[in-house]
Image: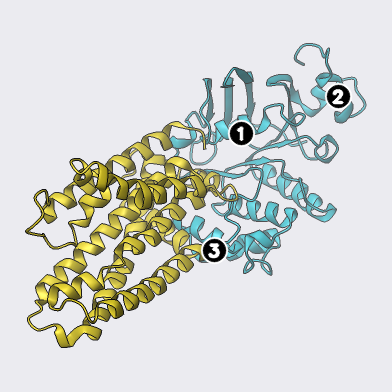
Amino acid sequence: MLPYNESHNRKGVLWLLTINNLVKQRGNHEILSGISFKARPGRVTGFLGPNGAGKSSTLRILLGLDRATSGSALIDGKPFAELQNPLSTVGAALDGFGAHRMRTGRAHLRWIARAAGLPRSRVEEVLEIVGLTDAAGKRVGTYSLGMGRRLGMAAALLGDPEILILDEPVNGLDPEGIRWIRTFLRERAASGKTVLLSSHLMGELAETVDDVVIINRGKVVANGTLEEVIGSHSTLEEAFFALTTEHAGAVV
Amino acid sequence: MMVSSSRKITSILGSELDKLVTLPLILRTLMATFIVNVVLTAAFTSANLQGTTGAQSILDTGLASMGYLQAGFIILGILATCSEYTGGQIRTTLIVIPWRGFQLSTKHLALAVITVPMAFIMAASGVLYAFIMMKDTAAGIETGTVIRTVIGATGYLTLTTLLSAAVGALFKRTTPALVVLLGYYFIVSPLMRNYLPRIKNYSPDTAGSYMYMPLSTDEINALTVMQGTGILLLWTLLFITVAIILYRRRDA
């Protein structure tokens, strides 16, 4: 595990993600009930929970896509919409492709690059990084699930951001893709970047994350380093099921 | 938030233009609209060749298809905003450009940049076709009148496209927006002209039609070009404002 160092980087900015007492209500249903945790630079934070637990809703609020009923989700102390250069600060890949299916993968990345004032050559670089160069001229609608995830990753990496926020990043990837993303995320964290990823696949993440936040039914049921959350259980998966069953105990 | 950098504004405008021109549906809609307009103008010209003569007849014939031509521009406007909601592209857009009011305004501006030349070409081609076919009867036609009329038609089609884009942003989905707008323009409004003659001039399409329809001396309640332009402009700004307010408030 990498040593944790919560110091400011060279620009004097702390790329810390702070979720504080987040509540989200849809109609009469409370889908988030006071979520609080932090994701720190130089660490990979795994945001884990079963489907429907509230992971995506939390990430959407953090990215300014949805409004919180109460509480806050801040990036370096600011809401997402107040960032001066969003793409070079946060790279995000949420569920789905995030692209119009009639447009080519390259055209999709080009409009993003143009919006952020990045050169077209950067599009070719990220296509190369995610291994999508050959398919870049094809329409997104023809992409497999794994190719769509790679396109989402390419978009997230365009601005070479300080923070990566990925929703279910291994979903749809083949074993080679999963291995690639594990290595890639570890390297990002090793270079001092902040990585927050959500998943419902415990086995795929145990070797990747430093810190773990487990959420169930809109509430955090565990929050700590990987070792702390695993505790006396043999694996992260066992700890997860123990914590998310009907009568799970208090927060770890 | 305020985006002060002119470079940022240029980048985002360029990005919105990229989105429009790389979407095959937009290009297909414009091509289909152009072809249908030429075919309809040819049909109207052929039918009118043995009818009335003079400059006014050429303008009337050249712009006789405006009622149908506007359908293509309504579809164009709706596609421009509703395409954001296909494939989850809206999430990418708001992660790259989280300043919602600014982003939607820029999208309308980009749409206007594309619509103005397209609308001018289509309106002018109709009038030009009618002129070529009916030139033997065109004695005394004033170039100034023709230019003013074509510019008025361009303005009408552009404002109608922007209004449609705002309605598309309100509905977020293409089909309901199409049903409402085409239902209004082709069913409700014609009925309103017959049954509610006192208020018909305040509707966006009837008021807007005075932008390109030369003032008829025998019509008691006719509007001037400026009055017609003003009323359609107000409707367009109203819909854009409501669309921006809702866009800023609701979850993406």
Label 1 element class: helix
Q: Quadrant of the N terminus of chain B?
A: top left
Tell which subunit mark 2 falls on: A
Who's the residue at 28% across and 54% down the image?
B159
Q: CA distance from mark 3 to mark 1?
A: 26 Å
- Checking the image for residue A241, the label placed there is 2
Residue B57 located left or right of residue A129: left
Q: Are marks 3 and 2 in contact (CB under 8 Å)?
A: no
Q: Secondary structure at mark 2?
A: helix
Mark linked to residue A107 = 3
Identity of the amino acid at label 3? Answer: Ala
Please give the letter of the chain rendered in cyan.
A
Figure colour of chain B:
yellow
Which secondary structure lies at badge 3? helix
Question: Hey, which quadrant is residue A142 in on the image?
Answer: bottom right
- Looking at the image, do the residues carrying marks 1 and 2 touch, with CB atoms under 8 Å apart? no
Q: Residues within 10 Å of mark 2 (few under 14, many from 20)?
A: some
What's under tag 2, amino acid-wise? Phe
